[in-house]
Image (cartoon, grey):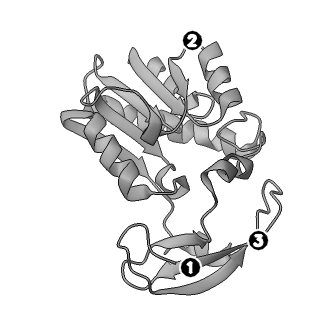
Amino acid sequence: MICNVCKSSQSEALFQARDYEHGVPGSWTIVRCSSCGLLAQVPLPAPSDVAGFYPASYSAYNSHTIISWMSEAVFAQDARRISQLVPKDACILDVGCGNGRALLAMRRRGFKRLAGLEIDAAAAQRAKQSGLDVRCGELMDTDFADGSFDLIRMGHVIEHVLDPMATLHRAYRLLKPGGILMGETPNTDCLDCRIF
């Protein structure tokens, strides 16, 4: 494996992963880059196969799972944090917005200039039905103009993309000068990761 962050060719296999939550068939080798510590699936899926990892039951698309209900508290907390970072007239992009629940939390906080980006067409359509400006596609391929956003939220997105560095560079270009990239990703050095 060539690490898609630091380009090192040295890694160690950690474990075989299976999808116990959604039942996506298969197993995948998870490796840690010996240079930068990135955990990655080997081999990486082909871009055309990525959508198959996220069935309709995936919590970002479905509002009827325990995880999606717990996410509501996270979305409300993120909206509160965002209201402390940027003014209400800020232009905000939520990458990987799913069915738009984080955008709705921001709208409840008084933000009006909201946009979302989601790879799943059905989830993007549900977000649009809530009156949200959501596009279907990936950040790398979007036609948003450079310098469009005051804040870009990427909650649990970067660990799902095939090229994290290119994705971060694209997000940087989309931000206005002084703009904020707000992200969250799993901590692979936590107790949950060791147990599960």
Give the crowd class for mark 2: few <14, some 14-19, many >=20 residues within 10 Å.
few
Q: Tell me the amino acid under the disc marked 2.
A: Gly
Q: Residue 9: x percent and y percent?
A: 44, 83
Residue flagged by tag 3: what amino acid is it? Answer: Ser
How far from the left and from the top, in percent, is residue 92? 36, 27
The residue positioned farthest toward the left in the image shown: 177
Measure how far apart labels 2 and 1 are at the Cα level. 41 Å
Question: Which residue is at 60% across, 65% downward?
Answer: 44
Mark 3 sits on what residue? 27
The CA distance from mark 1 to mark 3 is 13 Å
Q: Earlier in the sequence, mark 2 or mark 1?
A: 1
Query: Residue visible at 77% across and 39% down?
Result: 56
Say if mark 3 contacts mark 2, CB within 8 Å: no
Name the kind of residue labelled 1 in the image. Answer: Val
Q: Is residue 111 above or below residue 14?
A: above
**Considering the numbered disc 1 on the image, is that residue within a helix, a strand or a loop?**
strand
Label 3, secondary structure: give it: loop
Q: Quadrant of the C terminus?
A: bottom right
**Mark 3 / mark 2, whichever is N-terminal:** 3
- The residue located at (61%, 22%) in the rendering is 127
Q: Which mark is residue 131?
A: 2
Q: Which mark is residue 31?
A: 1
Q: Does residue 109 appear in the picture of this structure?
A: no
Which residue is drawn at the image coordinates 51% and 53% (left, top)? 161
- Is the residue marked by circle 1 packed among few (<14), some (14-19), or many (20+) residues within 10 Å? many
